[in-house]
Image (tube, helix red, strand yellow):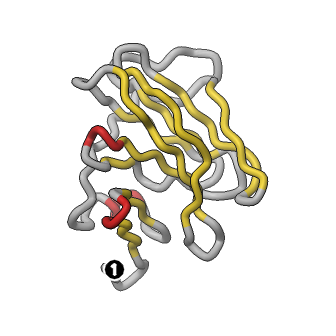
Amino acid sequence: MRTTTRAAGLLFAAAGLVGLTGVTAAQAATVPAVPRIPAQPIGPVVPGVPAQPADNFVLCSGGNYPSYAVFPKRGGFSTHVVAPHQCEQLSLTGIGKEQVVLYGLRPDGRPFTIAKDTFDDRDGERIRTLGTPDANDWTTF
């Protein structure tokens, strides 16, 4: 576990999962061993509007807990932890169809699995996590 002066990071290397809790997006980008591609925001996320090819994966935390997504075929690459009622947009290419695993974080920082989905970087995907840690769900939009 790496501790910074402001926050602690969680590294779940044994399970091939990378996630951060209590770390801002700016801090997360500087934590070693977090393989991630910087997001390139293109504007607000609008429900019902398909993801643009430049930002073909969108994760929104619609529940009352932070959430993140992990891409096992990309070496455990993960999104930043997305705070409740916030979104992150990413540009992901080169693999085609792959699994994406959605996780949430409990108030004590323990992760929980929300769901597994199939993501195709040619088509794009917009995911919103929903509910509470004990009654979680997700949807596409």
Tell me the quarter of the image containing the N terminus.
Answer: bottom left
Q: Looking at the picture, does residue 12 appear above or below residue 115? A: below
In percent of the image, x 41 and y 78: which residue is there? 8
Residue closest to the eye, 40 or 113: 113
The x, y position of residue 36, in whole percent, is 27, 48
Query: Which image quadrant is residue 60 in?
Result: top right
The x, y position of residue 103, in whole percent, is 54, 52
In percent of the image, x 49 and y 71: which residue is there? 22
Q: Residue furthest front?
A: 14
Q: Looking at the picture, does residue 71 appear above or below residue 95? A: below
Assess disc 1: are there few (<14), some (14-19) or many (≥20) residues with their C-alpha within 10 Å of its C-alpha: few
Q: Give the side of residue 35 with respect to residue 108, left or right.
A: left
In percent of the image, x 31 and y 49: which residue is there? 76
The x, y position of residue 4, in whole percent, is 33, 81
Q: Looking at the picture, does residue 79 appear above or below residue 14? A: above
Query: Which image quadrant is residue 111 in?
Result: bottom right
Judging by the rendered image, the residue that carries numbered circle 1 is 1
Q: Looking at the picture, does residue 32 appear above or below residue 45? A: below
Look at label 1 and name its amino acid: Met
Numbered disc 1: secondary structure: loop
Across the whole image, how many numbered discs are drawn on residues?
Answer: 1
In percent of the image, x 34 and y 43: which residue is there? 72
Q: Give the side of residue 51 with respect to residue 46, left or right.
A: left
